[in-house]
Image: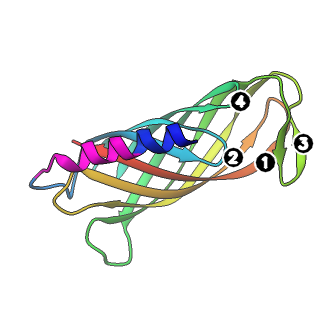
Amino acid sequence: MKKTTYILAICIAFLLASKRGNAQDYKWAAGLKFGGYESGISGKYFLQSNVALEGILGFRNQGVVVTGLYEIHQPAFKVDKLKFYYGFGAHFGSVGKRKYMFFSSPRYYDASLLIGADAVLGLEYVIPKSPIAVSLDLNPRVDLARGPFFDIAPGLGVKYTF
């Protein structure tokens, strides 16, 4: 956990050191996503001014999960550079052999394949006069390979926009 905190602090310091004149709108973003089950790297590409595709390569203990999301962005609370977004997508990946806990109930005792459907609901804020976007979201998902198994994973994202 300490290693992750140090890496995050270094990345944020590096990203904040570079400034950009107009960070209100962006076409691409790349960064880090910290979730309830997986943490990893993410990338976002806007197809239109309010429609984006987001991909997440998430790592967890003894496993990896790839998630793809189709998102619709809208202004939120009449706050400049704050967007509300929602969408849907899918995930696939695997987990290794070990015991996982979900609300004090064990899940996935053996190595397992993960395939399922996702939704996303969140807020994203682009920090004024910087290339940094910060997001906070909920990711309800249904895993179909070992289920159906439903859960909701929170997520915190920090992205560099360009």
Judging by the rendered image, the residue that carries numbered circle 1 is 150
Dot 1 or dot 3: first in sequence order is 3
- Residue plotted at (26% across, 61% down): 127
- Residue plotted at (45% across, 50% down): 157
Please tell me whether residue 130 belongs to the stretch shown in magenta: no
Is disc 3 surrounded by few (<14), some (14 to 19) or many (20+) residues within 10 Å? Answer: few
**Image marks 1 and 4: residues in contact by CB distance under 8 Å:** no
Q: Position of residue 50 (x, y in %)?
A: 33, 54
**Image marks 2 and 3: residues in contact by CB distance under 8 Å:** no
* Gap in angstroms between the C-alphas marked 2 and 4: 10 Å
* Gap in angstroms between the C-alphas marked 1 and 2: 6 Å
Dot 2 or dot 3: first in sequence order is 3
Is disc 2 surrounded by few (<14), some (14 to 19) or many (20+) residues within 10 Å? Answer: many
**Image marks 1 and 2: residues in contact by CB distance under 8 Å:** yes
Dot 1 or dot 2: first in sequence order is 2
- Residue plotted at (12% across, 56% down): 22
Judging by the rendered image, the residue that carries numbered circle 4 is 115
Q: Position of residue 100 (x, y in %)?
A: 82, 38
* Gap in angstroms between the C-alphas marked 3 and 4: 19 Å
Q: Position of 58 compared to 71: left or right?
A: right
Q: Amino acid at mark 2?
A: Arg
Judging by the rendered image, the residue that carries numbered circle 2 is 141
**Image marks 1 and 3: residues in contact by CB distance under 8 Å:** no
Residue range highlighted in magenta? 9-20
Is disc 4 surrounded by few (<14), some (14 to 19) or many (20+) residues within 10 Å? Answer: many
Q: Quadrant of the C terminus?
A: top left
Viewer-proximal residue, 53 or 79?
79
Q: Amino acid at mark 1?
A: Phe
Is disc 1 surrounded by few (<14), some (14 to 19) or many (20+) residues within 10 Å? Answer: few
* Gap in angstroms between the C-alphas marked 2 and 3: 18 Å
- Label 2 SS: strand
Judging by the rendered image, the residue that carries numbered circle 3 is 106
